[in-house]
Image (cartoon, grey):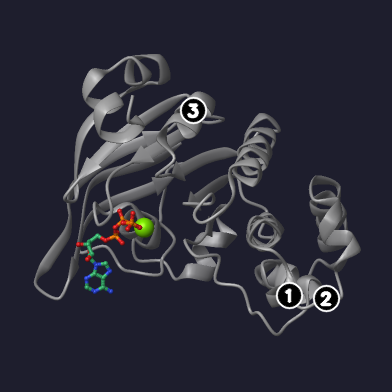
Amino acid sequence: MLTFENVSQHYGSFRALNGISLHAKEGELVVLLGANGAGKSTIFLTASGLLRATGGSIRFRNQELAGLKASQVVERGVVLCPEGRKLFPQMSVLKNLMLGAYVHRGDKAGNQRKLQEVFELFPILAERREQTAGSLSGGQQQMVAIGRALMGRPQALLLDEPSLGLAPLVVKQVFEVIQRINRAGTTVLLAEQNAYAALKIASRAYVIESGRIVMEGDRDTLLGNDTIRKAYIGA
Ligand SMILES: Nc1ncnc2c1ncn2[C@@H]1O[C@H](COP(=O)(O)OP(=O)(O)OP(=O)(O)O)[C@@H](O)[C@H]1O
Ligand SMILES: [Mg+2]
């Protein structure tokens, strides 16, 4: 249902994506593995309309996304939770969450329902709703970032390194939440350095090197692959 076909992306004359073709089927959790600089974030920025593809096609439920503005991509059900969280630290948790609902601002009742769902998923955010986002712990800030993306009502959620910089126990919680979101029916595309934890909850994965897909397979195939184990799992 989310399909990249031969997508290219450039920063000036530097080719960051070189003919990326990948897909996520309805309800799947698909992981993107790749070293620093491989192009994972560029894939997400391009899909979410924050960068314009320099070639190829990105379709979601047969609608073309390439060329749309970021807000139009959200309206079509594809929402990015960006690397580094990108919160407004001086604003309250609640205001940060509501920013994610901007494209649905006409539907106040729907946004209140969605907010309750986010608070059920992350009870700590309900308690801290009036606090500034910047005063929260790293893990709580990541929950705000995921919650803000959920306020956009994703049918496909793009999660860019949600476990980055978090303590192991918090990483585990974040992966549990991602799995819950996926099991509730949201298709997930997840970029992660934490390959083992990501693969364990994945349906399938792609390995990206220098802007190209170099390997793809289902979870068990990649978990059992020697190259993957050595390069990304360290076992
Ligand atoms: N704004 C930019 N201007 C120029 N080059 C960029 C820009 N953003 C990324 N790049 C380059 O594009 C390539 C892909 O970067 P990208 O951020 O997509 O990688 P990544 O896989 O997300 O890496 P990381 O794991 O470090 O987040 C890298 O070589 C990077 O240096
Ligand atoms: Mg990145």
x and y, in percent, of residue 30 in the image: 44, 34
Q: Is mark 2 within 8 Å of ligand 2?
A: no
- The image quadrant of residue 184 is top right
Q: Secondary structure at mark 1?
A: helix
Disc 1 designates what residue? 135
Q: Is residue 109 visible?
A: no
Question: Element at badge 3?
Answer: loop
Label 2, on which residue? 131
Mark 3 Cα within 10 Å, few/some/many (few <14, many 20+)? many
Q: Work out whether 124 lies above or below 86.
A: above
* CA distance separating discs 2 and 3: 34 Å
Query: Total number of numbered labels?
Result: 3
Q: Name which residue lies at 53% across and 49% down.
A: 163
The tag earlier along the polypeptide, 2 or 3, is: 2
Q: Are marks 2 and 1 in contact (CB under 8 Å)?
A: yes
Farthest residue in the left direction?
Answer: 13
- Crowding at label 1, few (<14), some or many (≥20) Cα neighbours within 10 Å? some
Neighbourhood count class around disc 2 (C-alpha, 10 Å): few under 14, some 14–19, many 20 upward: some
What residue is at 55 percent from the left and 71 percent from the top? 86
Figure quadrant of residue 135? bottom right
For the C terminus, give its image quadrant. Answer: top left
Rendered location of residue 120, percent (x, y): 86, 47
- Residue holding disc 3: 202
Q: Where 179 sits versus 10, above or below?
A: above
